[in-house]
Structures are given as C-alpha cells and as structure tokens.
Amino acid sequence: MDLTQSPAACVFGAPPHGLPVARIGAVQVSPLTPGSVALEDLAADSLEDAVICAPPGTVERRYVLALTLRALKPGASMTVMAPKDKGGSRLGRELADFGCEVDENGRRHQRICATTRPATPVGVEAAIEAGRPRIVERLGLWSQPGLFSWDRPDPGTELLLSVLPALSGKGADLGCGVGLIARALLVNLAVTGLDLVDVDRRAIAAAEHNVLDARARFHWSDVRAAPDLSGLDFVVMNPPFHDGGAEDKALGQAFIRRGRDMLRKGGAMWLVANRHLPYEAVLNEQFSAVTPRADKAGFKVYEARR
C-alpha cells in the first residue's frame, strides 16, 4: 500500500462477531495477514481511529498498543479487545499505564477497552524498544517477541534437526519461523533451492536476516493458500497447531496435505509434532510410506514418502 497518503483508521486482527468493528476503509495492520500494512510504518499522529484485537503475549501486546498510540492523533479513538484469559484482564491497566482514560466492559468472553489517545502518552518508546526485532543471543539469530519460540530453540525443532539427514535437490520449509531449520538445510550444498514460507511477516523479515543464501526464496503467505510450489524433492515442517490462540489440529493436518501436494513422486516430507497431535491418520492417507524417526520428550518425528 502507498503510505504517502496516510489511512484514517486501522484494524489489527479480526474482531469476533458482535464486537466493535473498524470503520470502513480501515487498513489491516496485523503481521499475520499477508499483504497487510506494517503498523510500524504508519506515520505518527496520523490516524483518527483504531480497533485492536490485542495479542496474548505481554511484551508483544504492549508493543502493538504503543505503536498504535504513536500513530493516532491526539484525542483519536482506540478500541482494544482480548479474551479475558489471554491478556484481556490486564488491558485496562496497561492502557492506564500509557496515560489513557479507559471505559472497560466485557462481552462474549472478551474484555473491551475504549479510550482516546492522550496528548502525550507515557512510556510509548520504551514499549516499542522492548518489542522490536533484535538479535537474540541465545539463538544467535534475529527474532522478535510474539514469534513462536522467539528467544530460545524449540525442543521439537531440535529433535527434528538431530535426526534429519542431508537432503538434496529443491525443497521447502513450511512455517519457517526465523529460519532455524532452513539454515541447517542449506549447510548441504546438494540443496539446490529452498522456499521458506510463513504467514507471519515478522518471521519472514527475521528469516531474511538469518538466511543469507542465494538458494533461499521467501514467501509471506498462508501455507494453505499459496505459494504455488510443486515438484519438490523434500518438504520439512514443524507445523503450527494454534490458530487465533486456540488449538486447531486441522491446521497441522492442512499443512501435511499441502506439503504432500508440493512433492514430486518419491519426494520426502520430514515432520516434527507434539506427541498428542493426531497426524498419523492423515500421513498414512496422503503418503505411500510413513516411517517414525524419533520419539522423545513429548515430540515425534516422521519421514513420509509420496
């Protein structure tokens, strides 16, 4: 979107049915919506209205609230909502800490806070600094609060990497995150190309910092919808199983089906998942051969051949 002419309103996420909605023409600013505008890029003191479905993580949520307050004009309205058990119970206090006067109520298991931007919000720059992208020492990689396992190696990914053989040819890393798996794959010069796909703009931005290899291509996209990849020799994934904060086993199953469609005949999928997730049936339905490769510390790894 051309931001030389600033939008009048923004919306972060999708308000549940029956709750306050954004005004017509509001731009979407959630990083989980491919093609959306980056909230960070909105001009200061430019918005007249904002509706925010606040994320659950404290640092990420305060980062989003601070960026929104920075973008709003003084006196402009902001409506913020979140489930009570996913940060909603703290919204009123957090907004008050920024200097906002808050009208708070509850509906449909959500806390809803209506406020206006004060003339001089308090602590905005500190909250933005705390939530910004940075190099995480423990990972040695770029990351950001709000991403999956943003500041430590995920044990499922570590288990997958411990048994993953040297792959070759063209492949894809679905739900690539900050690029931890991709970096390990590209150590092998027999890999001729690797497509990294993630629905989160922040993950793709971090991966572009972390995976400095001409064989890598990056796609900010929902795996279930795009990109149009086919004929691959391998697919690797640690699929998500939460959508909108709720566990959704169908999401991982959709990743498996989409990954299978990307493979050539005889191509291999390597998948790690929490042990309790019911992926065996869809794997056996979609692939000609499914082989367990590891089962440890609550995670399981499978190799599946098309």
Image: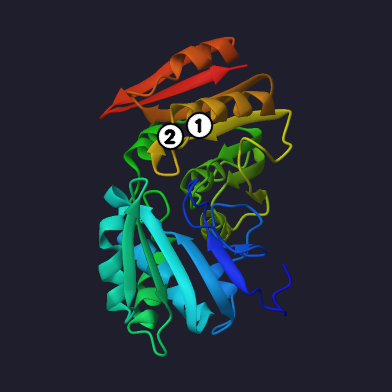
**Rendered-image quadrant of the C terminus:** top right
| Residue hosting label 1 | 251
Crowd class of label 1 (few under 14; some 14 to 19; many from 20; radius 10 Å):
some
Residue 236 or residue 113, whichever sits in front:
113
Q: Secondary structure at mark 2?
A: loop
| Residue hosting label 2 | 241
How far from the left and from the top, in percent, is residue 97?
27, 77
Residue in view at x 43 percent, y 32 percent: 248
Amino acid at circle 2 = Phe
Q: Secondary structure at mark 1?
A: helix
Residue 236 or residue 11, whichever sits in front:
11
Amino acid at circle 1 = Leu
How far from the left and from the top, in percent, is residue 32?
54, 52
Vertical position of residue 117 compared to residue 173: above or below = below
Q: Earlier in the sequence, mark 1 or mark 2?
A: 2
Q: How is the image coloured?
A: rainbow
